[in-house]
Image (cartoon, grey):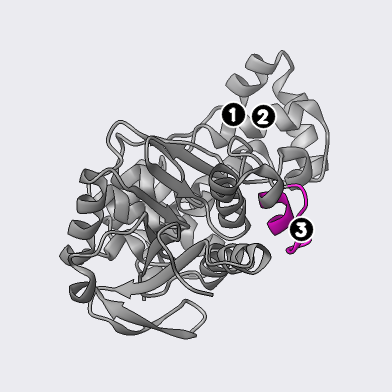
Amino acid sequence: MSTDATTRQIGIVLVPDFALASFSMVIEPLRIANRLSGRKLYDWTLLSDSGGAVASSAGIELQTVPMSAVRDRIFDLALICAGFHAERFKAASVLNWLRRHHRLGRDVGAVSTGTFVLARAGLLTGRRCTVHWDFRPSLAELYPDLDLADELFVIDRGIVTSAGSIAALDLMLRLIADQQGLAFSKAVGEQFVHSGARGAGEHQRGDLIHRLGTAKPILIEAVKKMEECLDRTLSPADIARSLGISQRQLERQFRTQLGRTPVAYHRDLRLDQARRLLSQTSLAVTDIALSCGFGSPSHFAQLYRQRFGHLPHQERN
């Protein structure tokens, strides 16, 4: 297939430890679109700060072109593909490349944790965005002013962000639909045995009924309140009062359905949150303890070791 003036050029920056699944869900829809159309609708170039091999989180390496080689080249879409440790990525050549494409009115985007890189480049101010749900607390902690949505993907005035993995496929099918038509996009999706591409507004995680394995309304509402309040402790009495039941009823349902008291369940949610912040950010352990509602760092360390078998600082080792 030959490249012509109608071919959309896509520059994909691979950040070390990028998520291979997310990368595949970006590239494969484009490849299939080219095959189904019989012409090169899309052409892509793999880039990195200094070029050469970049390893994914699975250890598989891909060859890339250095940013210096495309300094004067303009892409229709400048995309960041990241994974673990994206919050540490600070390559000036990449950040400037993203800013330049944005200034020129070209689309700029990210899949998986690439949103951290867009935030560091200052491109998300005043725009809605999303990131993989597991990294959402870390991104919110590092960039508290972001308008962060719990959605599969977000397209806001030339900035596209996606939660990654299958959500990256949903994003690419949406972009293909915008550019080539809905019928063609559906044909591409069917090649993935994915005939029902999800819309941008759908939530990333399954609902609480699925996650908890129960449809008890009291439990669903109680856990929802707990997940919305991970920066402080919640009184079971206050939760019960807000639900119009007694504290004894609340505690009985938690013990029967979830095997824990409300206090223990909420504490474990906050410890899980702390673990994400420890592994995904460089915030001080004391700051993380406070941000997750543990007033005493020593008490936090004790509870952390009881739950995970090691101290908080060892999480990073």
Q: Is residue 194 magenta?
A: yes
Three-letter amino acid code at the position of disc 3: Glu
Vertical comparison of 45 with 145: above or below: below
Picture quadrant of residue 312: bottom left
83 or 299: nearer the viewer: 83
Disc 3 to disc 2, how far (Cα)?
Answer: 40 Å
Q: Is residue 50 left or right of residue 289?
A: left
User: Which segment is the magenta one?
Assistant: 185-196
Q: Which residue is mark 1?
A: 225
Query: Considering only order in the chain, which callout, 1 or 3, is on the residue closer to the N terminus?
Result: 3
Mark 1 is surrounded, within 10 Å at the Cα level, by few (under 14), some (14 to 19) or many (20 or more) other residues, namely some
Q: Are marks 3 and 2 in contact (CB under 8 Å)?
A: no
Q: Residues within 10 Å of mark 2 (few under 14, many from 20)?
A: some
Residue contact between numbered discs 2 and 1, judged by CB atoms under 8 Å: yes
Foreground: 54 or 156?
156
Identify the residue at horizontal 44%, vertical 34% (top origin): 232
Whether the residues at callouts 3 and 1 have beta carbons within 8 Å, the answer is: no
* Relative to 206, 84 lies left or right: left
Residue depth check, mark 3 versus mark 1: number of the one nearer the observer: 3
Tell me what residue is drawn at x 23 percent, y 46 percent. 104
Q: Picture coordinates of residue 188 (x, y %)?
A: 69, 58
Task: Look at label 1 and name its amino acid.
Answer: Lys
The label number, if any, that marks residue 112 in the structure image: none
Q: Secondary structure at mark 2?
A: helix
**Dividing the picture into quarters, in which one does residue 239 lie?**
top right
Task: Determine which of the numbered discs, if any, sits on residue 190 in the image.
Answer: 3
Q: CA distance from mark 2 to mark 1?
A: 5 Å
Q: Secondary structure at mark 3?
A: helix
Q: What SS does tag 1 mark?
A: helix
| Residue 222: numbered disc | 2
Kind of residue at badge 2: Ala
| Residue 296 appears in view | no
